């Protein structure tokens, strides 16, 4: 089982994503356990303060070091983490290779940033990996955490009904997935390519490879491997 703890400022944002579809199936099969922890329970003082102004001035608030450290240490006391991941725009961009690697871990902690981020000392002292889901800024890291958990969770063996399905997803072989079709074979005069109706498995696989290559060359040439010679 893969256990993922998420340290969040707005835990309510994560109530829906993990209770439906594939991730719910993973939980029902005891293959994935996701726990969301409210950072405010570790806040300071009567009002459970978790943020403060940045030293040096400037707009925006910063998540304080002490509440984060208290939360992390309490969670670490329950068991070691393979990775403590901070979701941040300046982290390594999430890709399929990274999702594959993380799906093989046993226990992960995700820290959701908020406002102007977290005190740098937490990053230096506790964080082992920093991940971004794209070159844009969200209001907080909760939605980024949901994306990361979904990308990881579906890769755990036994989660998908067809174990080979994830292996044919886009990016698994550094190419985009080929076009797909389903019934009827003729829809409004638009026909499924004859090769897909031929039953010739080898030729179908070759067609799919060529379609993937062409689609990747056209839409995402940046992800092609150097050895493709493109």
Image: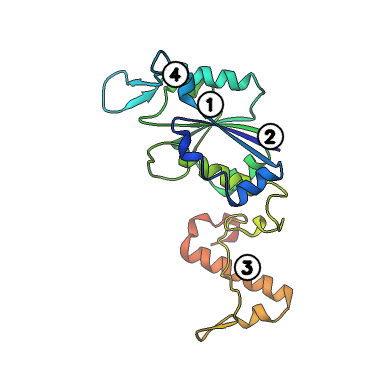
In the rendered structure, find residue 37 and report the number of the disc placed on it.
none
For disc 2, the neighbor class at 10 Å (few under 14, some 14 to 19, many from 20) is: some
Reading the image, the residue beneath label 1 is 127
* Camera-nearest label, 1 or 4: 4
Between disc 1 and disc 3, whose residue precedes?
Answer: 1
Frontmost residue, 30 versus 171: 30
Q: CA distance from mark 2 to mark 1?
A: 17 Å
Vertical comparison of 102 with 48: above or below: below
Question: In the rendered structure, are the residues bearing label 1 and label 3 in contact, judged by CB atoms less than 8 Å apart?
Answer: no
Reading the image, the residue beneath label 2 is 106
In the rendered structure, find residue 43 and report the number of the disc placed on it.
4
For disc 3, the neighbor class at 10 Å (few under 14, some 14 to 19, many from 20) is: some
In the rendered structure, find residue 209 and report the number of the disc placed on it.
3
Q: CA distance from mark 4 to mark 3?
A: 53 Å
Between disc 2 and disc 1, whose residue precedes?
Answer: 2
Frontmost residue, 124 versus 13: 13
> For the point 50% across and 64% down, which residue is it?
217
Q: CA distance from mark 3 to mark 2?
A: 34 Å
Q: Please identify the quarter of the rendering in which residue 52 is found.
A: top left
Question: In the rendered structure, are the residues bearing label 2 and label 1 in contact, judged by CB atoms less than 8 Å apart?
Answer: no
Question: In the rendered structure, are the residues bearing label 2 and label 4 in contact, judged by CB atoms less than 8 Å apart?
Answer: no
Where disc 2 sits, the SS reads loop
> For the point 60% across and 74% down, which residue is it?
182
Residue furthest toward the bottom? 189
* Camera-nearest label, 1 or 3: 1
Residue furthest toward the left? 58
Between disc 4 and disc 3, whose residue precedes?
Answer: 4
Residue 51: give x, y in percent of width and height. Answer: 37, 22
Q: CA distance from mark 1 to mark 3?
A: 39 Å
């Amino acid at each position: 089982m893969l256990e993922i703890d998420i340290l969040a400022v707005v835990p309510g944002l994560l109530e829906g994503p993990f209770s439906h579809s594939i991730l719910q199936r993973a939980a029902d099969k005891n293959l994935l356990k996701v726990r969301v922890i409210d950072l405010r329970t570790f806040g300071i003082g009567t009002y459970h303060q978790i943020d403060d102004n940045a030293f040096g001035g400037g707009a925006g608030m910063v998540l304080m070091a002490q509440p984060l450290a208290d939360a992390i240490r309490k969670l670490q006391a329950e068991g070691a983490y393979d990775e403590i991941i901070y979701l941040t725009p300046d982290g390594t961009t999430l890709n399929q290779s990274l999702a594959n690697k993380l799906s093989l871990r046993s226990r992960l902690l995700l820290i959701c940033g908020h406002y102007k981020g977290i005190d740098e000392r937490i990053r230096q002292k506790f964080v082992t990996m920093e991940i971004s889901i794209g070159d844009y800024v969200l209001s907080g890291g909760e939605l980024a955490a949901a994306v990361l958990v979904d990308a990881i969770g579906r890769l755990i063996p036994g989660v998908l009904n067809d174990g080979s399905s994830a292996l044919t997803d886009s990016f698994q072989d550094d190419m985009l997935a080929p076009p797909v079709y389903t019934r009827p074979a003729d829809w409004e005069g638009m026909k499924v390519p004859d090769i897909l109706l031929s039953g010739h498995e080898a030729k179908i696989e070759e067609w799919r490879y060529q379609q993937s290559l062409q689609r990747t060359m056209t839409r995402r040439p940046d992800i092609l491997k150097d050895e493709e010679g493109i």
